[in-house]
Structures are given as C-alpha cells and as structure tokens.
C-alpha cells in the first residue's frame, strides 16, 4: 500500500464506534482511491436500531479520514455508491492534491480522543468553550446544554432508569457478554473492563453474574443486582460532569446518508472537545430506546420493557423539549484525567483489503 494512504488510514481507524465494533473495512483501489465498506449490527445488537447507530459511526470514520487526508495536503471527495444493501453501505473516496489546503488542526487529537466513563469535574464550561463546540457542529445543527445541579440530577435519574432496561433485558445481556473483555486495560475490538468506570469489586461481580442469563435474572430479582452498576456507571458520573449536551439535527435523520452526515458532525464535536482538554462520555442508548418507543417497535421479550422505553422517551421530552425527537447524539462532558484504560483498534492490516481480488460484492438492487 502507498505509504501516504497507509498513514491516512492508520489515523482514520481511530474513529469511534459503538462498543468498539469498528463496522468498516477498507478496500484499496489505488494510491489515491479506496472504498469504505460499512456494515451494521442490527441483526444481533438491540442498540443498533435500523443500523442507524452504525451509520453514525460510518460518518465519524469518513470525517476522520477526511481530516487525516489534510495532513498530507489531500482533499477527500466522498460519494456513497449505489448497488449495495443498506446493511452494507459503501463509500468511494478519492484523494486529490490540494497544495493550498491547510492541515486540519483536529488531526492532532484523533488518537487522544477517547471515552471517559469515570467522574469528571463539575466546573461549568465557559461561554467560549460552548461557543467553540457549537461552531464545530456548524449552523444547521444545534447543541443544547444541561448544566445546573438540578439539571444534572434530572439527567442522572434518567440514565439510572435507562440503565435498568440495559441490565434487565436478555437482548442487551447478549451484547454486553460479547463486547466486554475482562481483566483487560486495553482491547483491540472490545471494551476492556477497566474502562467501564466501575471499581474492581463491582467488575468482579459483573464478570461472575454475566456468565449466564439465569444468573443475571437471579441477582436482579433477589439481590438487587443492578443497583451497584447503575449507581457507579450511570447515576454518579451523570452528576459528576460539567454539563450534559444534546446535538439536534435540522430535521430528524431518516436513512443512511442523514445518519452518516450526522456522524461526521458528531466526530468534529468530539474532536473539538478533546482539543479543549474536555473529556466526553456518550449517552446514546436513551435515544435508541426512545426511538423504539416512538416507532412502537418491540425490542425485547422482557415484560414491561416497552413501558420503560416509553417512560424514557417522556423524560427526554420533559428535559429537552421537542428537540429530543430530532436529536442525533447525547452525552456528558467536563474536565478530567485522561483515561488509563481504553479501547484501541484492530491493526490496519486486519481492516484493509487491496484490489483486485476483492471479497466485496454489490447487491443487484439499489439501496
């Protein structure tokens, strides 16, 4: 592979994705031409409703690639190709010489951007910081904030209620069992348990309980098994932050292109926060459960799950107003230490295939 292209892709692979799934593969067609083959996890991940969270990650990857290209004086032209199934979208990327193109300053923060799940400082963000973060998403998207103690407490209660769904439905259990790497500080393709934000004793208990679904049900029913994780992973961090944010699209995203565009916006927001020495933790699952409720779409065999999702949707609307229905991303942000444990990424050779012996194929129908 061309050395410059390899350097660009080596940076691009650090884009964020849900549970570190890295739902993309690179097909190199030439020194300045490639395809990004995406895939989603809707068939086995309850959090990937209609594949849209994966499409959000695809957009983050494309934005990261475009930013990385500027460090070599290259402009990335990106076009989604027809003939690929919605579950496996494909983008063609052409890198063109642009001698007057300045390197994007956000490139310096691609590798340091990460998730901080532990408590952050409650010091409010400055007006200048919030203005910079608003500028990062552009004029069409809006960032809303919840900063006061009362507002952070309301968010803590929302996330505490939301985590009860995550920890008590079998569909989420299957995801958690698959994506956590136990006794690990780093992980190439999962979430290391030391990055979860729980103390050592709680992690050991979680590892024991998650060995089987009957064990989860027993602990949840008789030993209040969700309380410790919900307090440590959701309630306390929600209080301990500078602010909660909601990024709102100009219109509710509908398909692959809308969500990929939103993903590009989210990545610029996240990288900008990193450049301001702010740490961030996404809180995307309430938006997913609210979307299930809005569509009246059953997502679990567990009795009462839909009622809980409806309650989450109502809480979101009460907290954020009608904007909650058109939101694309939510999380908390604040000053704090760099995480000592984090998800890394698969090496580039595992993510890349060089033409012409391509394993990637088109569908007969258009997306």
Image (tube, helix red, strand yellow):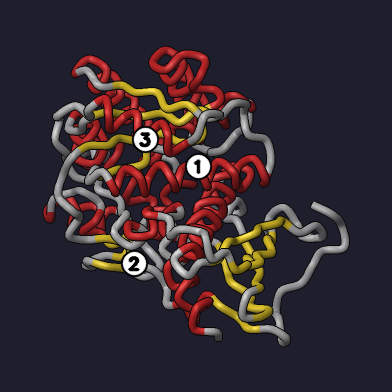
Where is mark 1, residue-wise?
265
Residue toward you, 341 or 309? 341
Secondary structure beneath label 3: helix
Task: Please say whether residue 238 is visible from this viewpoint.
Answer: yes
- The residue lying furthest to the right in this view is 364
Secondary structure beneath label 2: loop
Residue toward you, 68 or 149? 68
Q: Earlier in the sequence, mark 3 or mark 1?
A: 3
Residue 307: horizontal and vertical position, in percent? 49, 22
The residue that appears at 67% across and 45% down in the rendered structure is 257
- The residue lying furthest to the front in this view is 100
Q: In which quarter of the image is the N terminus?
A: bottom right
- 209 left or right, relative to 254: left
Residue 205: horizontal and vertical position, in percent? 19, 53
Residue 25: horizontal and vertical position, in percent? 58, 70
Q: Height in image: 162 above or below 47? A: above
The residue that appears at 52% across and 47% down in the rendered structure is 264
| Mark 3 closeness class: few <14, some 14–19, many ≥20 residues within 10 Å | many
Where is mark 3, residue-wise?
133
Where is mark 2, residue-wise?
344
Q: Which of marks 2 and 3 is nearer the N terminus?
A: 3
């Amino acid at each position: 592979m061309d050395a410059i292209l390899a350097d660009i892709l080596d940076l691009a692979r650090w884009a964020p994705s849900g549970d570190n799934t890295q739902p993309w593969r690179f097909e190199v067609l030439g020194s300045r031409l490639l395809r990004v083959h995406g895939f989603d996890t809707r068939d086995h991940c309850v959090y990937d409703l209609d594949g849209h969270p994966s499409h959000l990650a695809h957009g983050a990857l494309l934005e990261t690639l475009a930013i990385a290209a500027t460090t070599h004086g290259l402009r990335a032209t990106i076009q989604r190709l027809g003939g690929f199934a919605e579950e496996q979208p494909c983008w063609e990327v052409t890198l063109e010489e642009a001698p007057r193109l300045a390197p994007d300053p956000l490139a310096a923060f691609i590798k340091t951007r990460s998730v901080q799940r532990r408590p952050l400082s409650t010091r409010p963000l400055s007006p200048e910081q919030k203005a910079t973060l608003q500028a990062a998403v552009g004029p069409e998207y809006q960032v809303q904030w919840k900063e006061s103690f009362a507002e952070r407490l309301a968010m803590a209660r929302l996330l505490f209620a939301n985590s009860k769904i995550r920890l008590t439905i079998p569909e989420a259990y299957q995801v958690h069992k698959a994506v956590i790497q136990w006794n690990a500080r780093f992980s190439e393709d999962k979430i290391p348990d030391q990055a979860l934000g729980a103390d050592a004793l709680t992690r050991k208990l979680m590892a024991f309980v998650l060995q089987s679904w009957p064990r989860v049900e027993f602990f949840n029913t008789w030993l209040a098994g969700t309380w410790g994780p919900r307090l440590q992973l959701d309630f306390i961090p929600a209080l301990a932050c500078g602010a909660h944010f909601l990024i709102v699209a100009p219109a509710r995203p509908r398909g692959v292109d809308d969500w990929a565009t939103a993903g590009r916006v989210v990545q610029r927001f996240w990288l900008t926060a990193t450049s301001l020495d702010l740490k961030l933790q996404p809180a995307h699952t309430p938006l997913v459960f609210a979307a299930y409720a809005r569509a009246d779409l059953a997502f679990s065999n567990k009795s009462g799950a839909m009622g809980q999702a409806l309650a989450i949707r109502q809480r979101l609307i009460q907290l954020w107003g009608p904007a909650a229905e058109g939101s694309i991303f939510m999380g908390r942000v604040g000053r704090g230490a760099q995480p000592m444990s984090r998800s890394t990424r698969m090496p580039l050779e595992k993510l890349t295939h060089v033409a012409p012996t391509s394993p990637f194929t088109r569908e007969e129908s258009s997306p």
